[in-house]
Image (cartoon, rainbow, N blue to C red):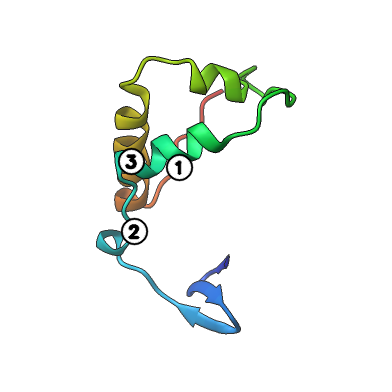
Amino acid sequence: MTYCDHGWYVNGTVKTFAADDIIFDTERVSKVIYDLKGGKAPDLAGLTAEHLQRAHPVLPVILSKLFQLIVMVKHVPVWS
């Protein structure tokens, strides 16, 4: 899927999704964090997969709420 001004390109057609259609549940976020490969270079903030995997168990709850809020308000916060 790639994003365009009118929605998402999926298999050659443009699909639109409402904020209610996209759900970041805690279990899914937990699984993605668990499945991250370790030993990779850190991101721009210096975080690695190991940081996320060894973080407090509440992290997937917070991240799922953050991701859902980003989708709902259609704005990605930028930290500088």
Which quadrant of the view contains residue 58? Answer: top left
Quadrant of the drawing holding the C terminus: top right
Question: Does residue 41 sit above or below 15 in this rendering?
Answer: above
- From the image, tell me which residue sits under label 1: 76
Label 2 secondary element = loop
Q: CA distance from mark 1 to mark 3?
A: 22 Å
How crowded pointer 1 is (Cα within 10 Å; few <14, some 14-19, many 20+) is rated as few
Query: Residue 3, percent across and down?
Result: 56, 65
For the residue pair 37 and 43, the one nearer the viewer reads as: 37
Mark 1 or mark 3: name the one nearer the start of the chain. Answer: 3
Question: Does residue 77 sit above or below 45 in this rendering?
Answer: below
What is the residue that sits farthest to the bottom in this orientation? 13
For the residue pair 60 and 74, the one nearer the viewer reads as: 60
**Disc on res. 22:** 2
Q: As drawn, is 3 to the left or to the right of 30?
A: right
Q: As drawn, is 23 to the left or to the right of 7?
A: left
How crowded pointer 2 is (Cα within 10 Å; few <14, some 14-19, many 20+) is rated as few
What is the residue that sits farthest to the left in this orientation? 20
How crowded pointer 3 is (Cα within 10 Å; few <14, some 14-19, many 20+) is rated as few
Label 3 secondary element = helix
Q: Residue at x 29, y 31 (%)?
A: 61
Label 1 secondary element = loop
Q: CA distance from mark 2 to mark 3?
A: 14 Å
**Disc on res. 27:** 3
Q: Amino acid at mark 2?
A: Ile
Q: Nearer the viewer, mark 1 or mark 2?
A: 2
